[in-house]
Amino acid sequence: MFDKQSLKRLAAPLIALALAACASASAPDSQGPPPARGEAMVTAANPHAVNAAIQILGEGGNAVDAAIAAEFVLGLVEPQSSGIGGGGFLMFYDDHSEAISAYDGRERAPAGATPTMFLDNRGRPLPFMDAQASGRSIGAPSLVAMLKLAHDEHGRLPWSRLVEPAMQLAEDGFEVSPRLARLIAAYGERGRLRADFAARAYFFDAAGAPRTVGYLLRNPDYARTLRAIAERGPSALSEGPIADAIVAAAQANPRRGTLTLDDLRAVTPRRMEPVCSVYRVYRACTVGSPSSGNATLAILGLYQRARPLPGGAENADDWSAFLWASRLAYADRDHYMADSQFATVPTLELIAPEYLDQRAQQIDVAHAPTQVLPGMPVGQELYDRWGNAFSEDSGTSHVSIVDAWGNAVSMTATVESAFGAQRMVAGFFLNNQLTDFAFEPTLNGRPVANAVEPGKAPRSSMSPMIVTDRNGELALVIGSPGGSSIIGYVARTTIGILDWGLTPQQAIDLSNATARTSSVVIEPSRLPAGIADAITARGWQLREVGAMEDSGIHAIRVTPQGLVGGADPRREGIVGHIQPAP
């Protein structure tokens, strides 16, 4: 069984590696040899992925190397969340220069995409499940190309070495985890996974029963794909038999898409400047457009203005201020944000100090808002034609890493919904990232900023974040999956760590409170005593979601005593720690 004892067995290699010294790397690197027995940490959504990353760090790899190894494993052991058929964003902190780089690996719409491709014959939006499990939802996979770009610029070990842990695991097999088994069964009942021949053969037995917890699942097709990626890099997915299989799956009925080999060859990840803002004595940085991670920074800035002296996790004023900040930031994000290469969007204007000062004047912690409208940042006349757009579905996975040099990676990767487009090729699932576009190109007669266009990236909420202190020293590495709720998940946990004095684990364990709309989604059993009653009395409408939300927050705090990590118990992650020398 894949129970707590199984998790402990999987984590055992971490303990052994923690007692071993970091070996020197075989490849030259400007960072020099790793510090002997330098401290390092990894936290991710599955023990197998953490094991792989720790192994790479133990061989002298750095944070980028470890993140790549972890993600190739995640694509195998939790294919419902991320993988080489999808995309993502990566943040890298260089301890030597104290520079932060952001990498964009978001999929883009094929050249044949049209603004109305998610409408039916009557001009009405398709049911989401129909749009998801279709060829129309598939964007050109961009994750591997992004990882290779980051490796070319910062990696230490050979690229092929980073693929080996996942390749070996795919050949040897891994035990189906409780979360994977639950999702296989759920999507099997809905009939979506069974409709794809490869997925049906992989996840169901000959009688049609779903694989259960503890079943040893092998994926030789994925191993062969990884071997091609090890040898050829990203071109393995844009030229040759794997690329042909991707195109064939995307163009298959029902609801065939238009993805072509030319679209795969056009994949061009990029390094871009991060979006940063001051938060108290810190500098918080995340990725820019096509993500709307600036909304996470807006929540932090608005909360800071409403609570210059925070009281802590048991203070109702703090919770009310956070909910207010969330409502205001989400209203702006939903209205304005899209791919800035296709639409003029106020990414920096929405987090400008003067704008946040003005926006925060609406906050009254004693009363919940009756209505929240988008604000008007500088240059509003450029943006008043945009309207609200579709909300992306939850899913995704996050990895946080600090290596022995003090470098860090915060990476969020996704195939969008559970099992992406639910079309499997060469051992992996293709994304349904294009359902992050607005299904309707206009709203109330106005064009929508996030409407489909050829070559355009759909809006994202992925917010991998790196926080430094006022001197540029690393302070916090954090991120989460969860669709549009990512924005609130990352902001609330950051506040818990930096303002409420909680450890990363304590802050992650605390109730999420997602206030995108007037209904606040909470986890009652995780709220401090009395908070639910106190904020309800102020007019907040609380909607309980039972024992958990679908976050997967993973965070590492840098303290004078060393690294302190946290893994989200709502998923199956752990913290791996290489201890420093005595």
Image (cartoon, rainbow, N blue to C red):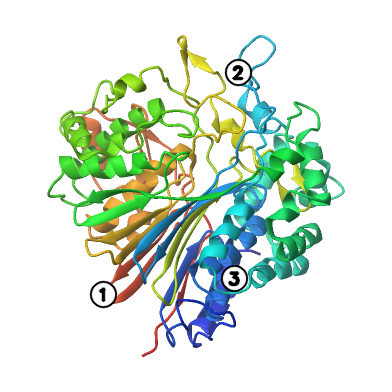
What residue is shown at x 74% (from left), y 34% (from top)? 191
Q: Decide: marks 1, 2 in contact (CB < 8 A)?
A: no
Q: Is residue 246 left or right of residue 327?
A: right
Helix, strand or loop for disc 2? loop
At label 3, which amino acid type do we have? Ala
Within-10-Å neighbours for mark 2: few <14, some 14–19, many 20+? some
Q: Split into 4 quadrants, where in the image is the C terminus?
A: bottom left
Q: Quadrant of residue 432?
A: top right
Q: Nearer the viewer, residue 127 or 121?
A: 121
Q: Can you give x and y, in whole percent of width and height, for residue 299 in the image? A: 29, 41
| CA distance for labels 3 and 2 | 42 Å
Residue receiving disc 2? 125
Q: Nearer the viewer, residue 46 or 21?
A: 21
Q: Nearer the viewer, residue 446 or 176?
A: 446
- Image label count: 3
Residue receiving disc 1? 560
Q: Quadrant of residue 194?
A: top right
Q: Of the residues under marks 3 and 1, which one precedes in the sequence?
A: 3
Residue receiving disc 3? 52
Within-10-Å neighbours for mark 3: few <14, some 14–19, many 20+? many
What residue is shown at x 72% (from left), y 54% (from top)? 235
What residue is shown at x 66% (from left), y 73% (from top)? 161
